[in-house]
């Protein structure tokens, strides 16, 4: 039965990877894979000799001798446990997405255009790279990419030049998302999963992530495409700017930044802080829009009429629900493999059988050098395979305590490794759609820059991690 479950997972994962070729949205195989994996576990529960205790991060003793009824009870408890942990991530993302959409409702991101006051191609490159790096750490790398490429399309007329800017924005946005607990889905997973804390995450990864962004941008500054000046369109946008644009931008970003602070003060899960932030932003949004819409009166005709004018209702209708359902499917499918102990056994065999590189060098900060190789391979794999299941698998593979440098290296590798291919990250995929970037063009023109940035950042992490 274990072989059948692994086969279902591999087939589902292949369907996700070949999403564009099959023309089937990746959320569909993710949900089907999740349901079938858990159905097979439920039907074959009596035959399984092992069960993984997520709370103790070890195989449950004597599971093979338990009665079928007790095994079913354990399976239901485990399923509920994983659903709860997954739901924490999904509710957190729903709140963050809604706040971002509220900011966009008031055209808040148009304020960012004020930062672009130069016509130099190199200076504009650095402005967008730095903006992408820091903005992605607050509103996540996917949203930051969408915002900045939208602005870029209004500033840079030459599409051939704009593609290079878009490529560097992808690298910078993924690098910026890696060092913030709210900057990338995978980093958020590690943060909510109590593998990293905000202070240590920033301490470990800010410099490596910055170098991952800065080195490719520095090299690109010397490329012929970035020589000279641009013809900047003075009429960037004909849309009338809302008088609350700047206010809602700073309020929304401040509310998202408040979430880690709320967690440190109250020790409550991050989604509670995000819901509080969403509530505060929603209050101001409703006041500024002068809407009488009531979220508790969905059945009234007046509510339906006013819903069109409610920024909260409008924003909720625009959030990426397909992405939420995809995360649900993939995380719960990986949880099925973890529960059977498959990931735990795989990690154990990996540690025992993988040839050691640099064995003459003593282990750094308490964990074996082989872990470095595994994590670096994870980063390379994230350029081909979605990094969400890779990080979910790492949660079941390693048992290091909170803030162990291994978890920070996982956050860095999974977050930045995807930049090496246009399909390797959500930021890359959305940029590919917005600018119709060719896969092989990116591979030829941008991938080598992303690889250099990834390796420089990884080397920097290996050198500096012993300081924390």
Image (tube, rainbow, N blue to C red):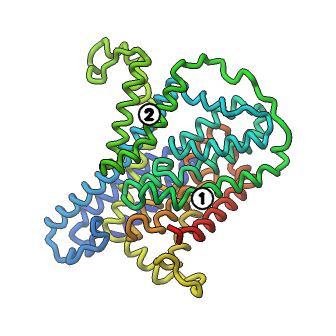
The residue shown at (28%, 69%) is 56
Tell me which corner region of the image, top left, top right, bottom left or bottom right, holds residue 62: bottom left
What label does residue 61 carry, if any?
Answer: none
Count of marks overlaid on the render: 2
Drawn side of residue 110 relative to residue 277, left or right: right
Q: Position of residue 285 (x, y in %)?
A: 42, 23
18 versus 396 height, above or below: above
Evaluate if marks 1 and 2 touch, with contact meaning CB atoms under 8 Å apart. no
Residue 11: tell me if it is visible: no
The residue shown at (71%, 56%) is 215
Classify 10 Å Cα crowding around label 1: few (below 14), some (14-19), many (20 and above). Answer: some
Q: What quarter of the picture does the N terminus occupy?
A: bottom left
Q: Earlier in the sequence, mark 1 or mark 2?
A: 2
Q: Position of residue 70 (x, y in %)?
A: 14, 66
**What residue did someone put label 2 on?**
99
Residue 67: tell me if it is visible: yes
Drawn side of residue 338 relative to residue 453, left or right: left
Closer to us: 457 or 56 = 457
Q: State how far apart marks 1 and 2 are (Cα).
A: 28 Å
Q: Position of residue 447 (x, y in %)?
A: 69, 56
367 versus 9 height, above or below: below
The residue shown at (75%, 55%) is 444
Drawn side of residue 456 relative to residue 32, left or right: right
Q: Position of residue 463 (x, y in %)?
A: 60, 70
What label does residue 207 carry, if any?
Answer: 1
């Amino acid at each position: 039965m274990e072989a059948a479950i692994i086969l279902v997972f591999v087939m589902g994962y292949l369907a996700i990877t070949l999403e564009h070729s099959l023309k089937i949205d990746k959320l569909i195989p993710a949900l089907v894979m999740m349901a079938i994996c858990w159905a097979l576990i439920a039907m074959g529960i009596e035959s399984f000799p092992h069960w993984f205790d997520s709370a103790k991060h070890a195989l449950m003793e004597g599971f093979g001798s338990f009665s079928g009824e007790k095994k079913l009870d354990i399976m239901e408890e485990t399923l509920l446990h994983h659903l709860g942990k997954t739901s924490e991530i999904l509710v957190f993302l729903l709140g963050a997405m809604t706040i971002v959409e509220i900011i966009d409702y008031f055209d808040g991101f148009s304020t960012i255009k004020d930062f672009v006051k130069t016509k130099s191609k190199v200076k504009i490159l650095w402005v967008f790279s730095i903006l992408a790096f820091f903005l992605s750490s607050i509103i996540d790398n996917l949203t930051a990419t969408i915002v900045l490429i939208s602005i870029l399309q209004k500033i840079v007329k030459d599409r051939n030049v704009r593609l290079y800017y878009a490529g560097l924005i992808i690298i910078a946005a993924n690098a910026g998302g890696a060092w913030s607990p709210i900057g990338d889905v995978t980093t958020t997973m590690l943060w909510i999963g109590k593998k990293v804390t905000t202070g240590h995450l920033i301490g470990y990864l800010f410099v490596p992530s910055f170098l991952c962004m800065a080195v490719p941008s520095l090299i690109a500054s010397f490329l012929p495409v970035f020589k000279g000046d641009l013809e900047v369109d003075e009429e960037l946008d004909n849309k009338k700017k809302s008088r609350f644009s700047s206010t809602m931008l700073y309020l929304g970003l401040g509310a998202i930044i408040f979430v880690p602070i709320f967690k440190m003060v109250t020790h409550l899960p991050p989604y509670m802080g995000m819901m509080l932030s969403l509530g505060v932003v929603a209050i101001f949004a409703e006041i500024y829009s002068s809407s009488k819409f009531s979220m508790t009166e969905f059945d009234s005709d007046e509510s339906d009429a006013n819903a069109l004018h409610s920024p909260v209702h409008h924003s909720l209708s625009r959030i990426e629900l397909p992405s939420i359902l995809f995360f649900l499917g993939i995380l719960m499918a990986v949880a099925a493999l973890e529960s059977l102990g498959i990931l735990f056994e795989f990690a154990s065999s990996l540690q025992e059988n993988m040839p050691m590189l640099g064995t003459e060098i003593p282990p750094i900060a308490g964990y074996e050098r082989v872990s470095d190789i595994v994590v670096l391979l994870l980063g390379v794999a994230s350029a081909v395979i979605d990094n969400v299941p890779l990080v979910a698998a790492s949660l079941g593979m390693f048992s290091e305590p909170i803030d162990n440098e291994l978890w920070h290296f996982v956050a860095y590798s999974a977050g930045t490794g995807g930049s090496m291919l246009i399909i390797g990250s959500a930021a890359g995929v959305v940029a590919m759609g917005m600018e119709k970037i060719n896969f092989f063009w990116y591979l030829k023109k941008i991938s080598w820059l992303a690889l250099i940035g990834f390796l420089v950042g990884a080397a920097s992490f290996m050198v500096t991690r012993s300081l924390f």
